[in-house]
Amino acid sequence: MQRREFITGALAALGAGLAPAQVEHVWARVCQTSHREGYCYQFVPVKTVTFFTHLVEHLIPTRDLTNADLALARFVDGAIEQTRSQREKVQITRCLEHLYQRYNRMAGAPDTTMTQLIGDGLMADDEEIAGPLNTIRQLAMVGFYTSEYVARQLLNFDPVPGHYDPEIKISELDKRTTWSR
Amino acid sequence: MQTFDAIVIGSGITGGWAAKELTEAGLSVVVLERGRYVEHGADYHTAYKHDWQLPNHGLVSNDVKKRLYKQARTGYATNPDIAHWFVDDRQHPYQEQQRFDWIRGYHLGGRSLTWGRQCLRLSDIDFSANRVDGNGNDWPVRYKDIAPWYDKVEAFIGVSGEMMGLEQLPDGIYLPPMPLNRVERHMREVLNRQFNGRALTIGRVAHLIGSGDFGARQPCLYRGRCMRGCPTGGYFSSLSSTLPAARATGRLTIRSNTIASEIIYDEQKQRAIGVRTIDTNNHKKSAVYASVIFCCASAIASTALLLQSKSRRFPNGLGNDSGVLGHYLMDHHFKVGATATTTKFGDSYYQGFRPVGFHIPRFVNLKPREPDSSLDFIRGYGYQGYATRGDWRRGFKELSFGKAFRDDMLKPGPWQVALIGFGETLPGKGNRIYLDETRKDEWGLPTVVFDARFRENEQRMRSHMQSQAVEMLSACGFDNVQAYDEGSYPGQAIHEMGTARMGYDPKTSIVNQYNQVHTVKNVYITDGAFMCSGGYQNPSLTYMAFTARAAAHAVGQFKTGF
């Protein structure tokens, strides 16, 4: 299975409102090919998209943040596509397939199950699971902490300090968070 | 026929100085720049972008990784906010008999846009080192000769720093120093108390600090985004400073997208008369003519140009009677030292993105004539370092996730301290570049081959750089003190020096004490190529001082005749 078959095109289609939530598949651009048009299109199961979104949400949660439409899953997916080597993409795809199958076999509430799945995956001896999952985790971190919302709302946004103060106290800051620019 | 009084090849840190000095002395000057034209400020198109406005929030794209595959060795040149300041390695190839990281910026302003901005003077310990230990050739210059030119350069570019009164790191003309933070002050106190002869100071950097009259430039805003280009001119670059000064004279012509392919030598006149050029866009060949030529294209590029400039008189390259052209290549070795963390000073923080860390000047082998018998290496090193509080990136190393982790990473992390050693490399003939006439670039020019490595003295010095860093951080009472040696390859410090060295004797050197090619008196080489040794100090300030001095000499010669 191609990774983009698993996620990307479907995320884009869902995000653009092209696929109603109740449908089971979306018609999505999934991978570059040598085909003349350059891409192939397939029906992608919505449930796999849902799984990926669920996974990213558990890595770096955003639902509790007011008016924070960070679209982290889409960011992570795009970052994988544009910044990872072909080899890494294949590893990530295999990892996701493995996690998806395991998730479906696990019993319990979705949130608890996902938390356990991620915890086990990151600590797994199998580097083919732990490595790619950690990559996804790190990309989710980049997407989150470098977002405009987090920079302005959660961190101390200070793009033009104009001076350097060598000694301030964290306890006296309105927000006791790091500086952001 | 296009004729000027002077041709300056290269528009970076020395090309800008040559252009400024020569035009201000009344000469008409053309600057040849092989890269694209860049307008100061207007063309710094990422300067005001936030992370979320960059492609993939600043992650490096596959496309850039493929194009800048050697520049990528820096670990930062491919970042989308600055990748446009580094060359496409596929378009500008070079070869490595041994690994050499040739990091370049082909655009107006060159690497003066992306330099580290450290301004450290060489001392007489450095200028006499070759003579004392017999490595390399003796500098035909001593500190007193160049000191007034350091003064001149520092006064113009603006250097923030602290006077220290150290023989090994002479003081200069400084704007107020940037302050040390809480942990750095603690380190300074410990070093003063427990390490006789060691000092810690803030880095001396070419940033405008304070409230003086800086003309069109403005003081540093502490944005910490220097390498994107500073639209307000908070740090020195040739685009913000020297080229505008040259332009103001009305005697400056800039030719961008123009490669200097050969210096034209006239055998009857026994001097150079011009430079052959190639337009990078349409490959059209042309020439410009002048009475004076300044090679400021960078150590490697200037030497390659001389090697390309063959004639009946100079079959091995212009001015290369000695055969040393291309030899005695140097860089600083670094990426060695120690790191630590501390949970002390937990409530201390700082505001502003200070563009420089601290500096621990050289403290070993300060009396080269009386070598320290406890050391198994000669020459010396210093440290650059920082103490900062970690941000969310510290979470990369953890395997945590979820809301608690997310919120914890928003807070300032523990203090992180690093000491990064910068060591001197001995000048050796075996470290060299040469041209491969069989492999040419798209403009038909031979490619440069590097054959250089760090040798035994550097390796022994690195062990000491590690152990002393551990000792100092441990004495400071820090936690998790860890030595590191990531390995260092020539070129990585982006301090290429040598290959057209200065000297008294035309039989063993290329240029004289005024940077003038011994046998072609109207050609000056003032970028890093002329260096006889490198000290441990970042070299750009020295290049600028020698360029200003050489320009004054050239003006005198221009008026009286070469």
Image (cartoon, helix red, strand yellow):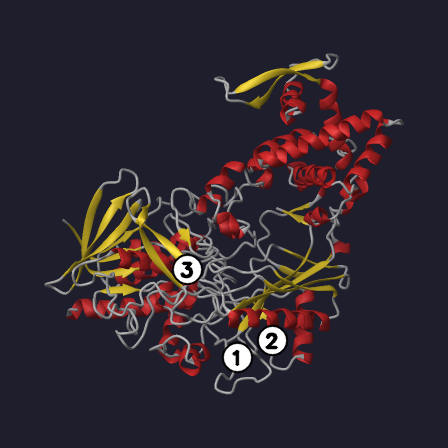
Name the element at disc 1.
loop
On the image, numbered disc 3 is attached to which residue?
A: B451
Dot placed on the residue nearer the N-terminal end, 3 or 1: 1
Q: Residue B166 carries which label?
A: 1
Q: Which chain letter goes with mark 3?
A: B
The Cα–Cα distance between marks 2 and 1, rounded to whole angstroms, is 9 Å
Q: On the image, which quarter does residue B384 sit in?
A: bottom right
Q: What residue type is labelled 2?
A: Ala
The answer to whether residue B360 is seen in the rendering is no
Task: Give the camera-side residue of B399 and B90.
Answer: B90
Q: Which amino acid does label 1 sit on?
A: Leu
Quadrant of image for the C terminus of chain B: bottom left
Dot placed on the residue nearer the N-terminal end, 2 or 1: 1
Task: Give the camera-side residue of B135 and A142.
Answer: B135
Closer to viewer: mark 2 or mark 3: 3
On the image, numbered disc 2 is attached to which residue?
A: B199
Task: Give the camera-side residue of A113 and B294.
Answer: A113
Name the element at disc 2.
loop
Q: Which chain letter goes with mark 1?
A: B
The image shows residue B291 at horizontal and vertical percentages of 18, 61
Q: Do the residues labelled 2 and 3 touch (CB within 8 Å)?
A: no
Q: Is residue B268 left or right of residue B261?
A: left
Q: Residue at x 50, y 68 (%)?
A: B455
